[in-house]
Amino acid sequence: MSDGTLYIGHRRYSSWSMRGWLAVRLAGLDVDEVLIRFVRPGPTPEITRISPNGLVPYLEHKGARVWESLAICDYCAEVTPSLWPADRIARAHARSIAAEMHAGFRGLRQGMWMNLGRDFSGLGRTPDALADIARIEALWAGTRAQFGAGGPFLFGADFNMADAMYAPVVTRLLTWKPVISSATQAYCDAVRAHPLVSAWYDGAAAEPDSMLVADYERAP
Ligand SMILES: N[C@@H](CCC(=O)N[C@@H](CS)C(=O)NCC(=O)O)C(=O)O
């Protein structure tokens, strides 16, 4: 018997689910996965019934109930502390950029939604989305310059919670292909090649056509 359950949405679209799932898998929690299909227009009644905030991801683990992707990341990092950097200053930075992701970048999220199965090259370039991308590129470059020596990820060789929080942003850049620097592209390629990110993409590709949601498939 497993230690609990992680509730997620469609792998193709649910960026927050991807974050929670990456955190849980990075920490190696032994939980079952339950995928709840979105009902449109939402909110999805089954999610509302199960999850305290009416949203996925939602984790039940050994009696703990955890919602909000950032809280799931922190819970998982209690199980596996190395998922945040060991150094106090690096850890503070990692937590800050993860929190910035959790709280913001609405322009990018609205203009370039997550869809792992489409190529929306050149579309979605709203001023707000482009401003968010500029901030994210600067943030990734600054983080890598200060903390990223020795590997392709934000804090070097190991894919950690900060990378997990930004992995869905990487998918957006790969789907919508805005103009980005070669350094940003290299980071995106490294994240895309990570085995857990690849596994998430494979799961998305295996979702049946009956799970497609018209609103997320239509080019803007
Ligand atoms: N702040 C939340 C956001 C979670 C969220 O917005 N999840 C969406 C899916 S990506 C959801 O559950 N929507 C409910 C629905 O569509 O019915 C978190 O960080 O976990």
Image (tube, rainbow, N blue to C red):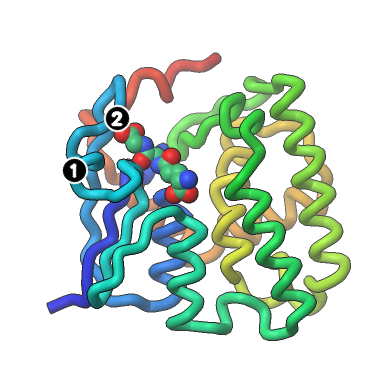
Instruction: Where is residue 209? Give x, y as percent.
Output: 25, 30
Callout 2 secondary element: loop
* Residue that sits furthest to the left in the current view: 1
Instruction: Report how far apart the C-alphas of labels 1 and 2 lie in the structure.
Output: 10 Å
The residue lying at 64 percent from left, 22 percent from top is: 124
Q: Is residue 63 left or right of residue 188?
A: left
Q: Residue at x 58, y 49 (%)?
A: 102
- Left or right of 62? Residue 79 is right
Q: Which residue is mark 2?
A: 43
Q: Quadrant of the C terminus?
A: top right
Q: Residues within 10 Å of mark 2 (few under 14, many from 20)?
A: few
Q: Which quadrant of the figure has residue 25?
A: bottom left
Write the residue at 23% across / 74% down: 63
User: Quick check: 181 above or below 126?
Assistant: below
Q: As shown in the figure, which amino acid type bears the numbered disc 2?
A: Pro
- Residue depicted at 84% across the width and 49% down the height: 138
The yes-or-no answer for disc 2 within 8 Å of ligand 1 is yes
Report the image quarter containing ligand 1: top left
